[in-house]
Amino acid sequence: METRILAGNLVWDEEGQLLLETVTEDRFVLVLPQIITLTETEEKLASDELSEKHSGLNVIARCFV
């Protein structure tokens, strides 16, 4: 398995796992822990600071592909 830096929306699956959903609706598991960049504000957040209130935000993050 390799990792790539991707942009997309943060989503949580049924098991509470943090995923990134791309514009093509593919879902990728985030590499944890990491610093995630919010694309709208360029704010950087540690992955352990994220909660379901961040669901749907557009971010740049490292993912397993």
Image (tube, grey):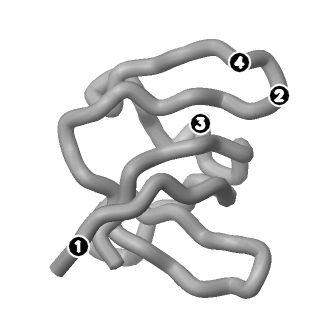
Labels 1 and 3: the sequence-earlier one: 1
| Residue 42 found in image quarter | top right
Answer whether labels 3 and 2 touch (C-beta < 8 Å).
no
Say what amino acid the circle numbered 2 marks: Glu
- According to the image, label 2 marks what residue? 40
Q: Crowding at label 2, few (<14), some or many (≥20) Cα neighbours within 10 Å?
A: few
For the residues marked 3 and 2, what is the alpha-carbon distance in whole angstroms? 16 Å
Labels 3 and 2: the sequence-earlier one: 2
Q: Which mark is residue 29?
A: none
- Left or right for 3, reference 51: left
Image coords of residue 65 (percent x, y): 34, 78
- Left or right for 4, reference 37: left
| Residue 38 found in image quarter | top right
For the residues marked 2 and 4, what is the alpha-carbon distance in whole angstroms? 6 Å
Image coords of residue 61 (percent x, y): 47, 46
Q: Nearer the viewer, residue 47 or 65?
A: 65
Labels 1 and 2: the sequence-earlier one: 1
Residue at screen point 27% across, 28% down: 48
- Left or right for 23, reference 38: right
| Residue 53 found in image quarter | top right
- According to the image, label 1 marks what residue? 2
Residue at screen point 23% across, 73% down: 2
- According to the image, label 3 marks what residue? 53
- According to the image, label 4 marks what residue? 42
Image coords of residue 40 (percent x, y): 83, 28
Labels 1 and 4: the sequence-earlier one: 1
Q: Crowding at label 4, few (<14), some or many (≥20) Cα neighbours within 10 Å?
A: few
